[in-house]
Amino acid sequence: MRIVLFGAPGSGKGTQGDLVLKKYGFPKISTGDLLREAVAAETPLGLKAKAAMDRGELVKDTLVVSMVKERINKPDCEKGYILDGFPRNIFQAEKLEESDGRREVAIEIGLSDKVVIERLGSRRVCSGCGAIFNLTLKPPRRAGVCDVCGGVLIQRDDDRRELIEDRLKVYHGQTEPLKHYYKKKGVFHRVNGEGTIDSVFEAIGRILDAVLGRRELGK
Ligand code: AMP
């Protein structure tokens, strides 16, 4: 089973992906996290990806696709995996399908642009372990300190106001058309991402339980 979580930046894909990982045990693959790690480590991939990331644009498809292919071929992905932030356009979705034709479910976490802008402005991430916080929705117990590892919380460079609108444009232009792609395949679901973290996860859980055959959708 492949679980594709998609939605605008700040829609909660990372947070929900972590909860799905905890409950269902599938590894979560975040292309944003993998790319940020590569940038920090100054690997050849990181050096190539950095400029596009700094501008809030998508990194070249060929680079991201080969990074994902390598990751999903690891033994922990054998039973299934969760994708957070990939595919970001139809080309990536087609390449993914070509290289791994397993059963999939795509869940859009829907959010208005206004809420995206508010959310990204108050998002903080741990510079140590990458845990995600939000100053209003999920504040850390101690200001500026990660609950998980005690690391320092920072604002992601691309969460600065001036880049948010560019990232939203990229989302609407390139990623949103994936809705139709997955609708055509009959695997598309949508949850309202404007609720609490728990209520969004409940909605995602209902879809996954139904798809995985645990109980009927809606119950
Ligand atoms: P995210 O953490 O998912 O918001 O990703 C942060 C940045 O990494 C994006 O703005 C892109 O520059 C890059 N990125 C992440 N995933 C992809 C992808 N699937 N394709 C191209 N670029 C990506």
Image (cartoon, rainbow, N blue to C red):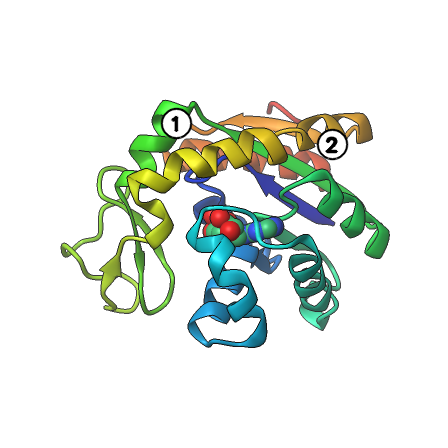
Seen from the viewer's position, the closer of residues 18 and 49 is: 49
Left or right, 194 with reference to 177: left
- Find residue 16 and report its horizontal and vertical position in percent: 48, 44
Kindly identify the amino acid type of the residue bearing the numbered disc 2: Tyr
- As drawn, 159 above or below 178: below
For mark 1, give the secondary structure.
Answer: loop
Q: Please report the residue visible at 67 percent of the width from the left and 68 percent of the height from the top.
A: 76
Quadrant assignment, res 62: bottom right
- How busy is the neighbourhood of tag 1: few (under 14 within 10 Å), some, or many (20 plus)? few
Q: Is residue 66 left or right of residue 108?
A: right
Reading the image, the residue beneath label 1 is 195
Quarter the C terminus occupies: top right
Q: Residue at x 48, y 58 (%)?
A: 51
The residue lying toward the viewer, choosing from 21 and 110, is 110
Please state which of residues 187 and 93 is positioned toward the viewer in this rendering: 93
Residue 210, image quadrant: top right
Q: Residue at x 26, y 58 (%)?
A: 154
Could you say where residue 67 lies in the image, as x and y percent from the top left?
Answer: 66, 65
Q: Which residue is mark 2?
A: 182
- Of 186 and 164, which appears nearest the observer? 164
Sequence-first tag of 2 and 1: 2
- Residue 156 x/y as whole percent: 33, 53
**Residue ranking furthest to the left:** 143
Residue 82 seen in this snapshot: yes
